[in-house]
Amino acid sequence: MSVIAEENVRGGSVFKEINADDEDSQPTEIESLCMNCYQNGMTRILLTKIPFFKEIIISSFTCPNCSWSNTEIQSAGRIQDQGITYTLNVKSKQVDMNREVVKADSATTRIPELDFEIPPYTQKGCKYSLKFLLIWKTIFTFQETAPEVAVKISEFIDKLKKLKEGESGFTLVIDDPSGNSFVENPFAPQKDEALSFCNYTRTPQQDAQLGIKASNEEEEEKPSNDIDTMRNEVLTFNTNCPECNAPASTNMKLVQIPHFKEVIIMATNCDDCGHRTNEVKSGGATEELGTKITLHLTDVSDMSRDLLKSETCSILIPELEFELGMAAVGGKFTTLEGILKDIKDLIVSKNPFTCGDSSTSDRTEKLKLFGQKIDKIMAGDMDVHIVLDDPAGNSYLQNIYAPDPDPEMTTEKYTRTFEQNEDLGLNDMKTEGYQE
């Protein structure tokens, strides 16, 4: 993705292309009006990448006449399909307070222990460490907007400073309907026990706040409900490319997986940038019980087993102390070797931490070592277990001995916890007597 910024030069204007993948990219400087003294100042714009996140635009304005300055960020991509809520249990001053936090202007920030909330659109988007975002950014806002209640503000600021110094733990909640906020996981690729997140479907009111027009075009042609017709037909609909946002087309097909169930395979091809992606959705309802599949890898031939990973499935490799969350890769219908390659690409090859200014020697060596272990697993040189844990019960791993049991694979059905039902949206779902 690139952003075109205008740069004033003698004799006219030129357009300079800014690309986040360019390691030598420099900020673009634009002379602009200072809204404090109404004289000319300088705005600097830079397109950059947040590791494990996405591209953002950082802009900074300074005025040499009145010394006024301002910094903000904007998402360089589109509004995400779903909103996101991050919940961080802050316990360690050294680790948690130095996390990088990206807060979009549409995000709500809360600290339940202090009954404190920063509403959306009251602060511009920003990228800071946690201690600056919560402490100094909040203090500056209070000092600028409410000097008449200085005593109460001073007491509250003292509480914030105590939290910053790590005198007591607290919970940070960032709720962003646009899906463009982010909290860093400093333990990547391992799971962060203190950090959790969940995606959710926006309400019509949130869509209106983001400027998204609600789709009321239900008078369009109603698709045929003939299931046999859908099985033999490839449906095509228009969408946008997730990489360059150019118009693209998505193909959708209903497929029957032997010894399992029907799934929907969706594939998107972009003619502009060449990006290709595929995704698998369950074609049926959420199962009554969750499914946990454990495979002991004993031979390299196991790499050719078919694997269906739904969007609600987590992947664990206990021997590597590795866990891949349910939303990291999305739904896929591939082989066991294919999913391991996707894990390696996500953690090593496409990881911004392994190159550029964001890389450190210890972290780079750690991630390279993890990639070498994945290569050993795919070559059959490492004795490990692969665990597929799907609360919705819609994931599948091929049994090459079917219809007989597989001696190296176990399938366990379990009752979901309240939290898992909450993540799947089942606790509030009422399918009988809902009209009462």
Image (tube, helix red, strand yellow):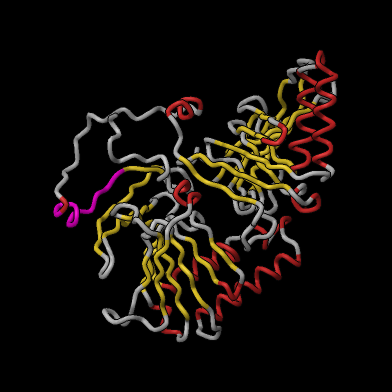
Query: 324 above or below 248?
Result: below
**Is 352 placed left or right of 114 in the picture?**
left
Q: Is residue 269 magenta?
A: no
Q: Quadrant of residue 124?
A: top right
Residue at left 76%, top 30%?
138
Residue at left 26%, top 60%?
262
Image quarter in which the C terminus is found: top left
Residue at left 66%, top 29%?
117
Query: 103 above or below 364?
Result: above
Residue at left 24%, top 49%?
235
Query: 119 above or below 342?
Result: above
| Residue interval drawn in magenta | 228-237
Q: Viewer-proximal residue, 122 or 404? A: 404
Q: Viewer-proximal residue, 20 or 183? A: 183
- Tell me where residue 344 appears, x and y as whole percent: 55, 68
Query: 17 above or below 29?
Result: below
- Tell me where residue 132 appears, x and y as whole percent: 78, 39
**Is 143 placed left or right of 364 in the picture?**
right
Q: Is residue 235 magenta?
A: yes
- Tell me where residue 250 appears, x and y as whole percent: 33, 49
Q: Among all residues in the image, which is located at the extreme top? A: 148
- Tell me where residue 306 appears, x and y as whole percent: 36, 72
Q: Quadrant of residue 168?
A: top right
Residue 62 visible in rendering: no
What is the tally of numbered marks visible in this picture? 0
Residue 52 visible in rendering: yes
